[in-house]
Image: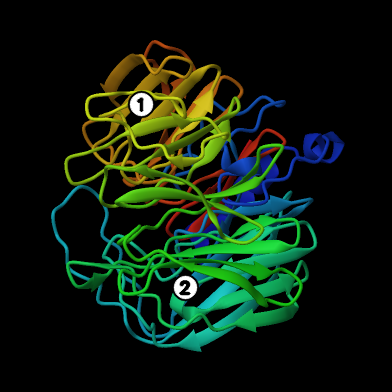
Amino acid sequence: MSLSRRTFLQTTLTALPTATLAAAPEQNWPMFRGPGGRGVADGFPTSLTWNADPAGKASGVLWRAEVPGLGHSSPIIWGNRIFVATAVRLSGKAPLKIGQYGNNDAADDNDEQRWMVLCFDKKSGRRLWERTLHTAKPAASRHTKATHANTTISTDGKRLVACFGSEGLYCLDLNGKLLWRKDLGVINVSKYGIGWGFGSSPALYQDRIVLQCDDPSKPFIAAFNLADGKELWRVARTGDCERSWGTPLIHHDGARTHVVANGWPFIVAYDLTDGKELWRLRGGGDNPIPTPFVADGLIVVTNAHGGKAPLFAIRPTARGDISLAEGKTSNDAIVWCAPNGGSYISTPVVYGGYVYLANTNGVLRCFDFKTGEKMYEERLGADATCSASLTAADGKIYCPVEEGDVYVVKSSPKFEVLAKNAMGEPCLATPAISQGVLYFRTAASLIAIK
């Protein structure tokens, strides 16, 4: 660590007290986008302004910890621990290309890698342990904007589940002990002949893990036993989905437990018990990436690219083919649809009666969640490229952008940027929120903002 970085770290650690954390009740963030994948954590005040750029004067930073390698894996939190995954290239630095561009080349990053899980202390940022799970050359290439560790870990409070696609599925205890591992074979989620990288995080529900593995040559979704990794069922998605990167939603509606998988040409829901199809919906965007979630009793799912970008609000009672008739924006199963309201990479957030979506071109959209009426469509900034998913807390929407800033937008049907905060490094991972503290994973660091 350089002297300037060490000085910055020591300054931020001593500048702000942590006693308030110790006194506050526990607030876990156990998976991608937190509880239920909703991206919301209320109950505590959260920061509006800060400066986390090491090149400037630090303000509002509780701590900063370096994270080796390169990964878009978002941090998760259980109790007083933060967990994150990464891929460490053994020779040289892994390349990352950010911003808007039309380059479809694969990254020059197929040298030997070390896939790791790291654990940090939530209050101080001290690294508690690290575990190397796999060391090899990648079995599939990745896009220049992706990494070899895109997926986020999931936990039930006793076990950690990490999935790296072609590099396997792993289960550890919270102290880093490996409980079991499973080889999934090569999963090459490809387009234009390029393996763009595996992006679907594991979903947990009671004693089960669900993985969505949409390699165009053999797409499938499967359930595994959390205790030992035994495969319980597998459903081929050939014809239903050509490719996707979204994390599946698991939702119990009071009668059945749905597994909702974003995809193209179809979004499909399965019964968690046996994998039988419950409903299907013809989607729109041919690069499905956002993760479905439930808000106010409705299933929210969106996708984009290829000229279409629908945003759907779906009743969990849906059954059969619920695809919309040409020119229609609702039916018995779909409360409303905004045909051109969806997002490409970033998962939306529903907060305070409105749904917010950010796109790679820096445009933020807001819709009334009851009716689907558009409230606004505005640009965050001329240089803003949003790939991270949105989160919300304390009346604010947090929008990290690739260029290394976090926009804070007022939760309101009227567009108002409250602040633009420097992080000092590219931001493509989705932040975690716990007890009023924002935890950002940047290209090289884990940063706590209080």
Q: Residue at x 84, y 41 (%)?
A: 22
Farthest residue, direction left? 102
Q: Residue at x 28, y 30 (%)?
A: 325
Nearest the viewer among 167 and 338 is 338
Decide if residue 449 is on the left or right side of residue 427.
Answer: right
Nearest the viewer among 362 and 216 is 216
Residue 122 % position (x, y): 72, 51
The quarter of the picture where residue 327 lies is top left
Q: Residue at x 42, y 27 (%)?
A: 356
Farthest residue, direction top? 414
Decide if residue 393 is on the left or right side of residue 268.
Answer: right
Residue 280 % position (x, y): 42, 46
Residue 141 % position (x, y): 30, 76
Question: Whole-Å distance between the Cαs marked 1 and 2?
Answer: 32 Å
Residue 356 visible, this orientation: yes
Q: What residue sits right under mark 2 in the picture?
A: 165
Decide if residue 208 is on the left or right side of residue 391.
Answer: right
Q: Amino acid at mark 1?
A: Cys
Check disc 1 and report its element: helix, strand or loop: strand
Label drawn at residue 337: 1
Query: Compared to 352, does 9 lie above or below?
Result: below
Query: Compared to 413, does 407 lie above or below?
Result: below
Q: Nearer the viewer, mark 1 or mark 2?
A: 1
Residue 442 % position (x, y): 46, 53
The crowding category of the residue bearing disc 1, from other C-alpha atoms within 10 Å (few below 14, some 14 to 19, many at least 20), is many
Nearest the viewer among 409 and 127 is 409
Check disc 2 and report its element: helix, strand or loop: helix
Query: Compared to 445, does 188 lie above or below?
Result: below
- Colouring mode (rainbow / by chain / secondary structure / one colour): rainbow
Label drawn at residue 2: none
Image quadrant containing the C terminus: top right
User: Label 2 near label 1: C-beta < 8 Å?
Assistant: no
